[in-house]
Image (cartoon, rainbow, N blue to C red):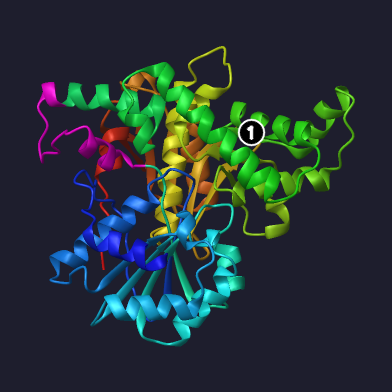
Amino acid sequence: MLREVLLEWKEKELPQNIVKREIKFWMNNHIASIIGPRRAGKTYFMFQLIKELFEKKFSKENVVYVDFTDPRTKKVGISEFLKEVNSLFEGKIFLFLDEIQELENWSSFIRALHNLQKYKIIISGSSSKLLSKEISTELRGRCISFIIFPFNFREFLEIKKFKIEKEFSEAKTGEILRLLKDYVEFGGYPEILLADDKNKKLEIARTYFATIFFKDLIERFKIKNIALMDYFVRYCITNSSSYVSISKIENSLKSFGFKISKKTLANYLRYVEEALFVFPVKRFSLKYSERAQYPAKVYLVDNVYFGIEPRFSRDIGKKIENLVAIQLLKKKFEGKINEIFYFNSNDYEVDFVLKEGLRVKQLIQVTYASAKDEIEKRELKALLKASKELKCKDLLVITWDYENEIKIKDKKIKCLPLWKWFLKDKVTKY
């Protein structure tokens, strides 16, 4: 049965429409694990890596790809696998093992392969089974993880066939702002951005959400009170880019007659984070104990999920902030940023505080502004106060379409359009 699968792979053509992901990927003697939210493009990233191997003069004789969702692979053992692979492939062999969690006793299977020190091993799987914490436990330090998010804005533009240039005319700027509105509204899931109808996009998003909810939360964490978990997750969705206070949720649930502890709610927040659906950002403090005293701000893995709960406003400011948060999180996973926080004091708030070691590296405000007079004075004052309190001179306001440098006393505040901020960084591959 496995032999049939491998022979089919040797005859299979790679998809032609592979969008090259901007992900820093490297390999040593460790197992490489590709993790990420469902439907974000893990399989296609594997195909990208395989294509790059072919460009380096490797061939199908050196590359094994197995999709373990194929029923013919469910019960394959290590002896059968080694026998078939070594009879059909030769030379330096790369093993791409997709949805590996579908294989019985997958971790012992992978450990046995790795112990041979003969193969380059790349695995991927659903976020419900192959989260980084579980991998480090199962594979005991033998694995390095790479996270796949939905498309970033540069990748989004590529699939929309928009050519990025060094200089942008007014017409070109208008075009990129139009595309940015679409990205802000519907995010970067590959299947969703290719759908040409708003209702279809939201229908797909609801399907994704249902799968994440039942597979990655209810089943994985053995949640018995489904109604409570549903309330909690939807509360996070409607309050994305805002504070989520465990105490407030507890009081809200009590008003509906539910009994639930703060500890359980705190666990729920950890669960949705481990499912790669919601990402909490804590208040900045050099003392960990002080961070825990304040509510977290939560951000969704993709903007399309804003649309699955009814809202009374467009919330475009919150959507822009959510995009910035996810881009910063990507940079954190890539090792470009050490830690991300928000900061507030008695009378002001800064959206993002980027920290390296004991030093605050940058302060960022996010606003839906297209001119200087549209930037609220309180946002600039907040940057100035935080700059003094946190001893940081790098001050940035991410705007919709306003670029300039604002000088206030001895401080300089740089204003940069969102699309330029997205495009100014490009991942370097190693």
Q: Position of residue 350 (x, y in %)?
A: 52, 38
Residue depicted at x 37% and y 41%? 396
Q: Nearer the viewer, residue 84 or 356?
A: 84
Kindly identify the amino acid type of the residue bearing the numbered disc 1. Cys
Above or below, 86 relative to 394: below
Residue 62 on the magenta segment: no
The answer to whether 163 appears left or right of 100 in the picture is left
Residue depicted at x 66% and y 34%? 233
Mark 1 closeness class: few <14, some 14–19, many ≥20 residues within 10 Å: many
Q: Write down the quadrant of residue 2 in the picture.
A: bottom left
Above or below, 173 relative to 245: above
Work out whether residue 316 can be spotted. Answer: yes
Residue depicted at x 49% and y 47%? 37
The quarter of the picture where the N terminus appears is bottom left
Above or below, 333 relative to 342: below
The quarter of the picture where the C terminus appears is bottom left
The residue identified by callout 1 is 236
The answer to whether 347 appears left or right of 121 in the picture is right
Q: Nearer the viewer, residue 182 or 107?
A: 107
Magenta span covers which residues?
A: 151-172
Q: Position of residue 298 (x, y in %)?
A: 59, 39
Residue depicted at x 54% and y 58%? 102
Q: Position of residue 175 (x, y in %)?
A: 19, 23
Above or below, 122 relative to 112: above
Work out whether residue 408 can be spotted. Answer: no
